[in-house]
Image: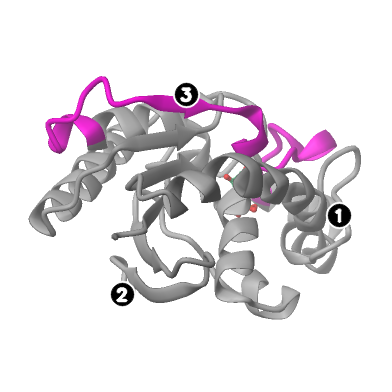
């Protein structure tokens, strides 16, 4: 039985383009983001992949990316579960701030710590560890059992919610996962064994 799990970060958003901390804000996709989502769908179609079930966050950039991918796969209307647990990490007081201006205001080092340390949250927001503490219980309760039952599953979500998942799937340390940058609109294909361990990983960015 195939146990297929595909993760995809949303295509470029309006706020990615403007270089703003986004977190739980809900900007739409740019034209480039729409194109990236189409390309992700085409890549999956070229691999002859399709799905029984989809998961996404409650944020429109992830939902729209998923919608475009499903359109490319001729799977519009696929059963889709949406949950806030898969949202981007909450960037707290940094939300809406330009990332370069934040570096000027708080210093390069501090902004890097807020963006890429494992357990130091930005002011009023979530660290990667806190993000993982909501993503992983949801994965274990809702996503993994369905993958293990043979439902071919796609998850369209966000840079940091997906980092939490990848850390778990690939057994990475906090240092290793924080070095991993996820491209917008780039699918990563996992095949799992009956215990949920990863048998193979195919990153379509590579
Ligand atoms: O929320 C955001 O601003 C981005 O989606 C991810 O940002 P990061 O690369 O600063 O973690």
Q: Which mark is residue 34?
A: none
C-alpha gap between disc 3 and disc 2: 27 Å
Q: Residue at x 65, y 79 (%)?
A: 176
Q: Residue furthest top?
A: 77
The residue under label 2 is 206
C-alpha gap between disc 1 and disc 2: 34 Å
User: On the picture, is 151 further left or further right than 89?
Assistant: left
State which quadrant residue 85 falls in.
top right
Q: Residue 145: image x %, image y %?
A: 53, 47
Question: Quick one: 116 or 86, which is closer to the camera?
Answer: 86
Observer able to see residue 30: no
Query: What secondary structure is found at the residue carrying circle 3?
Result: helix
Residue 89 lies in the magenta-colored region: yes
Q: Which mark is residue 60?
A: 3
Question: Quick one: 175 or 195, which is closer to the camera?
Answer: 195
User: On the picture, is 187 further left or further right than 40?
Assistant: right
* The magenta segment: 70-99
Query: What secondary structure is found at the residue carrying circle 1?
Result: helix
Q: Earlier in the sequence, mark 1 or mark 2?
A: 1
- For the residues carrying marks 3 and 1, which lies nearer the camera in this image? 3
Q: Which mark is residue 106?
A: 1
C-alpha gap between disc 3 and disc 1: 30 Å
- Mark 1 CB near ligand 1 (8 Å cut): no
Q: Earlier in the sequence, mark 3 or mark 2?
A: 3
Query: What secondary structure is found at the residue carrying circle 2?
Result: loop
Q: Residue 12: image x %, image y %?
A: 40, 42
């Amino acid at each position: 039985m195939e146990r297929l799990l595909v993760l995809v970060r949303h295509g470029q958003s309006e706020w990615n383009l403007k270089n703003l901390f986004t977190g739980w804000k809900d900007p739409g996709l740019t034209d480039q983001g729409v194109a990236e989502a189409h390309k992700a769908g085409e890549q999956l179609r070229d691999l002859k992949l399709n799905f029984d079930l989809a998961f996404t966050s409650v944020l429109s950039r992830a939902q729209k990316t998923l919608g475009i991918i499903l359109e490319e796969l001729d799977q519009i209307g696929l059963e889709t579960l949406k949950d806030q647990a898969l949202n981007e990490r909450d960037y707290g007081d940094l939300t809406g701030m330009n990332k370069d201006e934040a570096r000027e205001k708080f210093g390069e080092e501090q902004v890097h710590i807020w963006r890429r340390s494992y357990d130091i949250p930005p002011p009023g927001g979530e660290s990667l560890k806190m993000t993982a503490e909501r993503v992983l219980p949801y994965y274990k309760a809702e996503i993994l059992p369905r993958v293990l039952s043979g439902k071919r599953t796609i998850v369209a979500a966000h840079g940091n919610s997906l980092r939490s998942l990848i850390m778990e799937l690939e057994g990475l340390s906090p240092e290793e996962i924080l070095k991993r940058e996820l491209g917008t609109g780039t699918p990563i294909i996992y095949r799992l064994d009956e215990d949920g361990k990863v048998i193979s990983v195919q990153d379509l960015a590579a």
